[in-house]
Amino acid sequence: MGTRVIAIDCRPWAASSWLAVAKSCLLPTAYCLLLLLSGCNTDGPDESSSANTQHTACADWMVAKLKSYGADVIEQRSTVKAYNGKELPLRNIIASFNPMAKARILLLAHYDTRPMADKDSDRPHEPILGANDGGSGVGILLELARHLGGKQHGPGVDLLFTDVEDYGQPSGAMTVDEKSIDTWALGSQYFAKNPHVPGYTARFGILLDMCGAKDARFYREAISMQFAAGIVTKVWRTAESLGYGDRFVQETKYFVGTDDHLPINRAAPDPHHRHHRVQRGHQRLPPELAHPRRRHET
């Protein structure tokens, strides 16, 4: 794996009016997709069971939709162990457009949602809806897939929909050691160790997570700046040249602690021959990144 990935992430956000938020921020098709995803993609309290029909139905629908757009679809199925020892089924979905092109771009989002609302003091044991968590990123990628289906030139594009991103150690149990970080993003951890194509690499990658907030402002995210500052600069400059400089703010903010881009970045060769591995200790990370921080809507 030799791909550097940045995150486009907007937080904090108010979850009370997510329908209005999504409708005002997303393209109409992406908004409709988000509604569908939010309705079918609520992980049950026992995600270890393969009988989680909502999650399975969501993945089945996504695979069929991606194939209808002309993508070559590969599924990664396995079993991973959660922070509490529970065995969870894993189903990553990779949709490739122009698969024969050597130059490739990786775009990713997670399609699972958190089975417990541990940030909610009133209903902490209920699953979250996930509309502006994985749902917003997945809706955008599915809309991009619809357009990529008619594209006959340019670099190849791989859309990675990761599973079991959001089953990490609850915030009340989080510690500052590396083990709590590594309980998150299990789907992207699996992909980083088992790419769908041997020796896979992309020119760059972009992660979309929590990107549907009303009047969103996207700041340069700290992990992205650590691993791929040059890519961040290019993306933010491109946004400015297109007239979106007020949305893509030239300021580093929001230390997310961990997300799907971290395992992939950690698997990429370091051009300076240094090893950025959280499991070796936090002395290589900025202090802010040593403490996992997750925000979830009610």
Image (tube, helix red, strand yellow):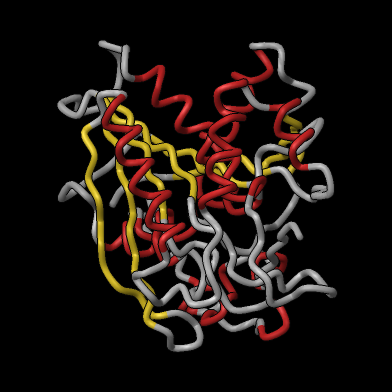
Tell whether 51 sits left or right of 31.
left
With respect to residue 116, does 60 lie above or below? Answer: above
Q: Position of residue 89 (x, y in %)?
A: 34, 70
| Rendered location of residue 216, percent (x, y) | 77, 34
Which quarter of the figure is the C terminus placed in? bottom right
Q: Considering depth in this image, is 196 or 79 the residue closer to the camera?
A: 79
Q: In front here: 184 or 130?
A: 130
Q: Quadrant of residue 264?
A: bottom left
Which residue is most to the bottom? 85
**Which sits in the foreground, 132 or 49?**
49
- 150 shown above or below 67: above
- Judging depth in this view, the residue of 216 and 226 nearest the camera is 216
The vertical placement of 244 against 271, above or below, is: above
Q: Position of residue 133 (x, y in %)?
A: 63, 50
Left/right placement of residue 91 relative to residue 216 reads: left
Q: Residue at x 18, y 49 (%)?
A: 199
Residue 148 image offset from top left, x and y in percent = 36, 19
Image point (61%, 21%), residue name = 28
